[in-house]
Image (cartoon, rainbow, N blue to C red):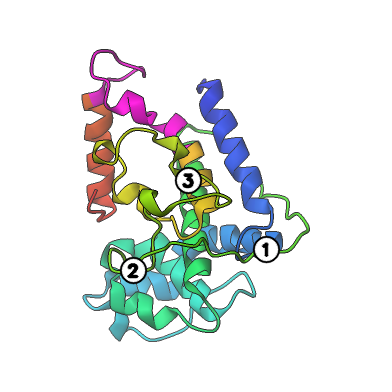
């Protein structure tokens, strides 16, 4: 198939981003998260838990392909294989000395980008990409000031609390808050760079913010309604509350 150049360029950029040092993980650790994400569906423990009525009742160890901390492996595998049944108590058990809230948020972005790129390429009949090249450098380990608790499992940064020099994660939707700055924008805001990397790939794969709300014209080969039907069906299959 022939894919839009903009879409392929956005995926290539996101894939390269995965290999660089982030805010909480080194480049090598981020590539390990990509590898673990790809491996999770083959994990015997994950397969047993997914089939169980109560996943937490199934004890055991994950099959791993990395040296990542156990809480990170658990997060990657469950997000990849059974995300629809995760809850705040599971999240609270993970967070601790080996997995901070910032590390968890960046991990979610890496898993999401990996699954999105891999799923697109599989559906399009394209070969899977090689693992990103891990780049040297240290994580910045900077938490943005102004975050708030109470909305999500982890702290979030609201638009009205954003200020330089924090990366401008809300540049992607310059409209007023009531027109799109919903929870989807807040979800990864504890690590603004992660939110920006995800959104810069997401928009070319879906629609840009202004295009989502412009029903006077169509921007893709399929209509707004067809796009939303596919999105809703995919969300239902993945047990997502989209």
Residue labelled with disc 3: 169
Q: Reply yes or no: does residue 71 show up in magenta.
A: no
Residue 128 appears in view: no
Q: Earlier in the sequence, mark 3 or mark 2?
A: 2
Q: How far apart, in angstroms, are the residues tagged by discs 3 and 2?
A: 18 Å
- Give the image location of residue 204, x and y in percent: 46, 30
Local packing at callout 3 (Cα closer than 10 Å; few below 14, some 14-19, many 20+) is many
Q: What element carries label 1?
A: loop
Query: Disc 3 vs disc 1: which is toward the camera?
Result: 3
Q: What element carries label 3?
A: helix
Q: Is mark 2 on a helix, strand or loop?
A: loop
Q: Which mark is residue 149?
A: 2
State which region is magenta.
201-224
Proximity of marks 2 and 1: CB atoms separated by less than 8 Å: no
Local packing at callout 1 (Cα closer than 10 Å; few below 14, some 14-19, many 20+) is some
Residue 87 as seen in the image, left or right of residue 12? left
Residue 102 as seen in the image, left or right of residue 148? right
Q: In this view, does 152 lie above or below 228?
A: below
- Give the image location of residue 216, x and y in percent: 24, 13
Residue labelled with disc 1: 139
Q: Which of marks 3 and 1 is nearer the N terminus?
A: 1
């Amino acid at each position: 198939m022939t894919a839009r150049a903009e879409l392929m360029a956005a995926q290539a950029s996101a894939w390269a981003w995965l290999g660089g040092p982030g805010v909480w993980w080194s480049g090598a650790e981020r590539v390990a998260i990509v590898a673990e994400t790809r491996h999770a569906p083959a994990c015997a423990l994950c397969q047993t838990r997914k089939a169980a009525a109560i996943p937490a009742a199934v004890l055991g160890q994950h099959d791993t392909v990395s040296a990542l901390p156990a809480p990170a492996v658990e997060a990657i595998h469950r997000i990849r294989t059974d995300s629809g049944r995760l809850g705040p108590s599971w999240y609270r058990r993970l967070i601790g000395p080996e997995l901070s809230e910032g590390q968890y948020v960046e991990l979610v972005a890496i898993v999401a980008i990996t699954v999105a790129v891999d799923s697109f390429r599989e559906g399009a009949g394209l070969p899977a990409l090689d693992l990103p090249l891990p780049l040297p450098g240290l994580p910045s380990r900077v938490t943005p000031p102004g975050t708030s608790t109470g909305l999500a499992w982890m702290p979030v940064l609201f638009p009205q609390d954003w200020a330089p020099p924090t990366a401008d994660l809300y540049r992607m939707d310059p409209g007023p808050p009531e027109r799109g700055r919903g929870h989807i924008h807040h979800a990864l805001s504890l690590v603004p760079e992660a939110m920006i990397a995800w959104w810069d790939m997401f928009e070319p794969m879906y629609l840009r913010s202004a295009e989502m709300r412009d029903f006077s014209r169509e921007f893709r080969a399929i209509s707004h309604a067809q796009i939303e039907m596919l999105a809703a069906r995919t969300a239902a299959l993945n047990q997502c509350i989209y």
